[in-house]
Image (spheres, grey):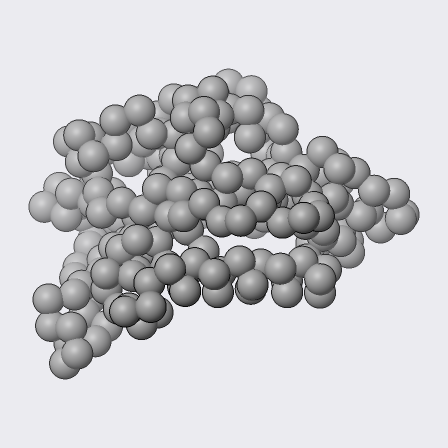
Amino acid sequence: MAWLMRKSIAREDSPMVNWTPETIEEILKSNAEVVARYPHLSMDHPEFLAKGGAATGHHTRMPERPHEAVVEELFGPLPDALTSSIVNDRIKNAVEAIEPGVHQFIPTIITMPDGSRDASWWAMRICHSIDAIAAEHCVDFHEYRPKPTEYPDYFLYRSNEDNRMRVAVYKDRLARKAIWWDWRFQHTFFSEQLGQYFLDNSVRGYCLPVDELKRSMHVIEV
């Protein structure tokens, strides 16, 4: 089994967090450098998207200074995952215990509403981009062709993502992986081991084992 990653929208798990303008500029610069590695591919080319696009699937140059983000408002103790990409040591260490050195964690400083600064956070960049959906075993899935004229063989997967949805992935494509981006479904997934660690240790910020609509996040491996 695996888990579909969905960020919790519970009020206590959803502080208002924004990157500083300087960090936004650095992120855009890093993403542009990724794009420049593939001068023969446009940003909407299926081959480029299969590699993860600009934001996932690649290690980037480590910035000279930590990223910085500002917590504008919070509604209780900070969760372990502030956003889908800003995480604390517990999440970083759990991912690296399964896949040491595979994913990129950029040092990040958080400024709290009272002006205090916390340098124990990380910007997590997922460095696996995989096509792992076992569509024939899924429920409420269909193919979607975003550019049928330009790329007739290129398709993604879509779902209504209601209580009928059941997701299945190919187990042999996920061996020894902790976390990955599925480029056809355009969602992030956790391994069974990582998701179970989050549950056993009350890691906050993700919808596990169900989301706010009681949809199970468990994914079948076939």
The part of the image, by quadrant, that contains residue 216 is top left
- Give 208 or 125, whichever is nearer the viewer: 125
Q: In the shown orientation, is residue 207 left or right of residue 3?
A: right
Above or below, 193 against 86 in this view is above
- Give 168 or 162, whichever is nearer the viewer: 168
Q: Residue furthest bottom?
A: 149
The part of the image, by quadrant, that contains residue 26 is bottom right
Q: Residue at x 20, y 53 (%)?
A: 140
Q: Quadrant of the N terminus?
A: top left
Above or below, 57 against 171 in this view is below
Residue 100: give x, y in percent of width and height.
Answer: 45, 25
Q: Residue at x 15, y 43 (%)?
A: 134
User: Is residue 209 among what the camera can see?
Assistant: no
The part of the image, by quadrant, that contains residue 188 is top left
Residue 7: give x, y in percent of width and height.
Answer: 51, 46
- Count of numbered labels shown in the rendering: 0
Q: Quadrant of the C terminus?
A: top left
Residue 182: give x, y in percent of width and height.
Answer: 30, 48
Q: Residue at x 19, y 55 (%)?
A: 141
Residue 53: give x, y in percent of width and height.
Answer: 37, 59
Q: In the shown orientation, is residue 49 left or right of residue 145?
A: right
Q: Residue at x 22, y 42 (%)?
A: 132
User: Is residue 155 among what the camera can see?
Assistant: yes
- Give 90 or 140, whichever is nearer the viewer: 90
- Give 124 or 37, whichever is nearer the viewer: 37
Q: In the shown orientation, is residue 41 left or right of residue 93?
A: left
